[in-house]
Image (spheres, rainbow, N blue to C red):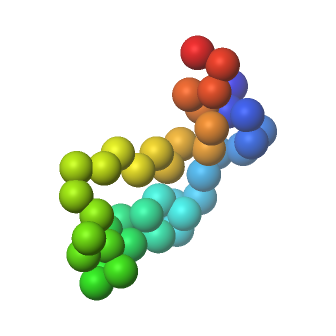
């Protein structure tokens, strides 16, 4: 059902979490960061 036609590898999910834990996200507040391979498209 995912538009990208694959299940995300665990390391892809880990990259999203690592971004949020890093200094690169220090100005990210109240954001929803979709890491679902486009599953919400067309709903």
Identify the residue shown where x is 38% and y is 72%: 19
Q: Residue furthest bottom?
A: 23
- Judged left or right of residue 4, residue 8 is left
Residue 28 visible somewhere in the drawing? yes
**Quadrant of res 42:** top right
Q: Residue 25 in the image: x percent, y percent?
A: 32, 73
Q: Residue 1 in the image: x percent, y percent?
A: 68, 25
Identify the residue shown where x is 41% and y is 50%: 33
- Judged left or right of residue 35, residue 28 is left
Report the number of discs.
0
Q: Which residue lies furthest to the front in this view?
A: 27
Q: Which of 16 and 33 is in front in this view?
A: 33
Q: Which residue lies furthest to the top in this view?
A: 43
Residue 21 visible somewhere in the drawing? no
**Quadrant of res 4:** top right
Q: Nearer the viewer, residue 42 or 14?
A: 42
Q: Quadrant of the C terminus?
A: top right
Q: Residue 32 in the image: x percent, y percent?
A: 35, 45
- Determine whether 37 is above or below 9 in the image: above
- Determine whether 26 is above or below 43 in the image: below
Q: Residue 6 in the image: x percent, y percent?
A: 72, 44
Identify the residue shown where x is 53% and y is 42%: 36
- Judged left or right of residue 38, residue 4 is right
- Determine whether 33 is above or below 38 in the image: below
């Amino acid at each position: 059902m995912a538009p990208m036609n694959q299940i995300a590898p665990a390391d892809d999910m880990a990259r999203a979490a690592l971004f949020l834990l890093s200094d690169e996200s220090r100005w990210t507040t109240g954001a929803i960061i979709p890491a679902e391979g486009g599953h919400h498209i067309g709903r």
